[in-house]
Each structure stands twice: as structure tokens, then as C-alpha cells.
């Protein structure tokens, strides 16, 4: 190769090395990831009596995943994310009540409505500091909750939206009480959304979001529009939350007013912090641990089960920095350091 050819090849190799170091090339599926999704599929066969609970865990995990996108990667805190979850649920539910119960199109409609609403309110949410965002998102969620409560002729109010009839999935698989179709459907939707978000956070846009989280005052110096990035990621997050809500309406064939409630927003935030923010898998692990512990402890102690949940949260926060996955990473690092 000539000197000119070598000089031309150097920048390309340097760019590839820089991309690998920056995380752009870190998209290969690791054995632990493959094992995780394989176990999620096998759990349906290993615990046939818990398929309904399993589908609820998968749906809530998708909701937590949407929150992780804005909190863990962009640093946008929210206490009213259930607004988008509930919008997706009511959209799919109302479509089914009025004669259109096709699952996939209803799912997309729920995500689209939530995404549109997320885009409209994002210009208000992203302005200000963390405390301002907490109050604004909380206010939006409360207003939407009361609006749905007031419009009982449409939403059913406190009695909920009943009469939701979901058609057979792909025209062949009927949603039943056993929960097999609901579990597989929820797992498939969760996995597809996870793949999209995984690709997103490893893209240049995802790296920009991390820069936005770590130092928002520095990003404009790099030529990045902070407002545009925040609006874009908030809109995507709202759409994913809407899909999760629509999934809940279709699998349970009921939409309650609590889908828009503050409790749901607070619980999903707890689940995310429990698993670890900014990791994607933290949302999935935190949701599974929280909901399984809740079901188990409520069965043992129906009255004081929240005490044990609170104790679990305190222990995780005090001794596992970065949530469960952060604690595991620290433990693995210590074991490796001891061996060396």
C-alpha cells in the first residue's frame, strides 16, 4: 500500500476504534442477555399457574422501560408518566368497546395517541429544573385523571371501562382465562420494543442523551439542540408507555381509572430505581422483583406486607448503589479484583 493509501486508512481505523470505545459498536447480544430472554419464555412453562401475573409483570416492565428512557438516559424526572400509560389503555379500550378489537392496530393506536399527547406537553415538561419537571408532570397526570373521572359517560369513571372485547390475535389465538396468549403476546411486544430502544440508546442519539444527562450545559457547545433532543426522547417515551397501557387494556379487557393514577406513576418509578436506572435491563429486573415480592408478601401477610416492601427498598438503596444491577456489577468487580 502506498503512503497515501496508508494515510487514508488510518482515519477509518481510528474512527472504528473510537466508535467501539464510545459504545456505538456495543450492540452484540451477550450470552447473559440471551439467557435472560430465554428464561422469560421458559417461565411460562415452568409456572403455568402464574401466567396472568407474568403478563402483568411484562406489561409493567414495558412501562418502566419507557420511564428509563427519559430518566436513566436523558435525566428527565417524571411523577406523572401514568398519563401516557392511561391514554394508551383508554384508546385501545374505547376502540374495542365501539367495535374495533383488533389487537395490533389497537396497540399502535394507543401508542400513537400517547405519543401525540407526549409531544404536545413535552415543550412544557422539559423546561426548568428537576423539581419543576416533577411538579409539571404530576400536575398533568392529576388533571388527566380528573378529566377521565369527570367524563364517566365515556370512560366509565370510577367504575372503569368495561365491555372491552379483544379479537383473536392474528385471527387465530383467543385471549383466555389461562393467560397463555396474553403472556406470549406481552412478551413479544416487550421484546420488540426493547430491541428498538436498545438500538436507540447505542446510536449516536443515545450517546447524546447520556451527554445531556451528565452535562446539559455543555451540549450546546457541541452544536446539539438540548430542547429538540429532550422533546424527541420524551415523545418516544410517551409512545412506549401508551403501548404498554394498550397492552394492559387488551389482555385484561378492562380499563380502570387507576391506569392514570399517581400510584401507578410512583410505583413504576420505585421499580426502576430498584432495578437500576440507565441500563434498560434494570427496568425489567426491578419490575419483576417488586411485583413478585409484592405478590408473595401479600400472600404471607395481607395486612402489613407494605412494611416488608419498604424494608426491601431501604436495603437495596443503602447497600446496592445503582439498584440491583448496580449492586451485582459492584460485587462482580470486587470478586474479579480479589482474584487478581
Image (tube, rainbow, N blue to C red):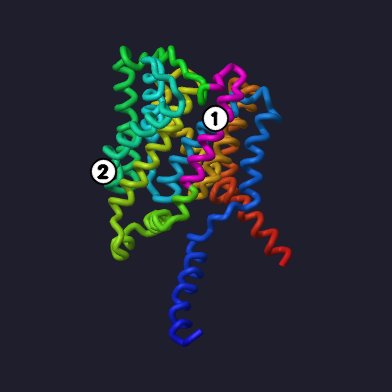
Residue positioned most to the front:
1
Residue interval drawn in magenta: 172-197
The dot on residue 123 is 2
> What residue is rendered at 65% in x and 51% in y?
31
Q: Main secondary structure of the magenta part?
A: helix
**Quadrant in the picture for the C terminus:** bottom right
Residue 19 at what x, y percent from top left? 48, 65
Mark 2 residue element? helix
Residue at x-position 51% and y-position 66%:
21
- Of the pair 9 and 204, the residue shown nearer to us: 9
Local crowd size for mark 2, using a 10 Å CA cut-off: few (<14), some (14–19), many (≥20): some
Q: Which residue corresponds to mark 1?
A: 185
For marks 2 and 1, give the CA distance.
34 Å
147 to 330, vertically: above or below: above
Q: x, y percentage for residue 113? A: 33, 31
The secondary structure type at the circle numbered 1 is helix
Determine the residue positioned at 32% across, 37% down.
118
Amino acid at each position: 500500500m502506498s503512503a497515501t493509501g496508508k494515510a487514508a486508512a488510518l482515519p477509518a481505523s481510528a474512527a472504528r476504534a473510537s466508535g467501539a470505545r464510545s459504545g456505538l459498536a456495543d450492540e452484540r447480544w451477550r450470552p447473559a442477555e440471551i439467557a435472560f430472554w430465554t428464561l422469560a419464555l421458559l417461565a411460562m412453562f415452568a409456572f403455568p399457574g402464574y401466567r396472568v401475573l407474568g403478563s402483568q409483570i411484562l406489561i409493567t416492565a414495558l412501562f418502566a422501560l419507557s420511564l428509563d428512557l427519559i430518566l436513566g438516559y436523558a435525566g428527565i424526572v417524571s411523577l406523572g408518566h401514568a398519563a401516557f400509560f392511561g391514554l394508551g389503555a383508554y384508546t385501545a379500550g374505547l376502540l374495542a368497546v365501539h367495535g374495533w378489537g383488533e389487537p395490533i392496530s389497537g396497540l399502535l393506536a394507543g401508542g400513537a395517541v400517547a405519543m401525540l399527547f407526549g409531544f404536545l406537553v413535552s415543550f412544557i415538561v422539559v423546561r426548568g429544573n428537576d423539581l419543576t419537571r416533577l411538579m409539571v408532570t404530576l400536575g398533568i397526570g392529576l388533571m388527566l385523571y380528573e378529566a377521565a373521572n369527570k367524563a364517566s359517560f365515556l370512560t366509565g369513571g370510577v367504575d372503569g371501562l368495561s365491555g372491552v372485547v379483544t379479537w383473536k390475535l392474528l385471527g387465530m389465538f383467543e385471549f383466555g382465562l389461562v393467560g397463555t396468549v396474553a403472556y406470549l403476546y406481552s412478551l413479544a411486544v416487550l421484546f420488540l420494543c426493547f430491541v428498538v430502544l436498545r438500538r436507540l440508546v447505542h446510536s449516536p442519539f443515545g450517546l447524546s442523551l447520556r451527554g445531556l444527562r451528565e452535562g446539559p450545559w455543555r451540549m450546546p457547545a457541541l452544536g446539539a439542540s438540548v430542547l429538540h433532543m429532550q422533546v424527541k426522547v420524551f415523545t418516544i417515551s410517551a409512545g412506549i408507555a401508551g403501548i404498554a397501557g394498550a397492552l394492559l387494556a387488551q389482555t385484561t379487557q378492562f380499563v380502570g381509572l387507576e391506569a392514570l393514577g399517581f400510584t401507578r406513576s410512583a410505583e413504576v418509578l420505585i421499580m426502576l430505581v430498584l432495578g437500576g436506572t440507565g441500563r434498560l435491563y434494570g427496568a425489567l429486573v426491578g419490575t419483576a422483583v417488586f411485583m413478585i415480592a409484592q405478590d408473595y408478601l401479600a400472600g404471607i401477610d395481607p395486612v402489613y406486607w407494605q412494611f416488608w416492601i419498604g424494608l426491601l427498598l431501604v436495603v437495596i438503596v443503602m447497600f446496592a448503589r445503582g439498584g440491583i444491577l448496580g449492586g451485582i456489577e459492584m460485587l462482580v468487580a470486587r470478586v474479579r479484583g480479589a482474584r487478581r
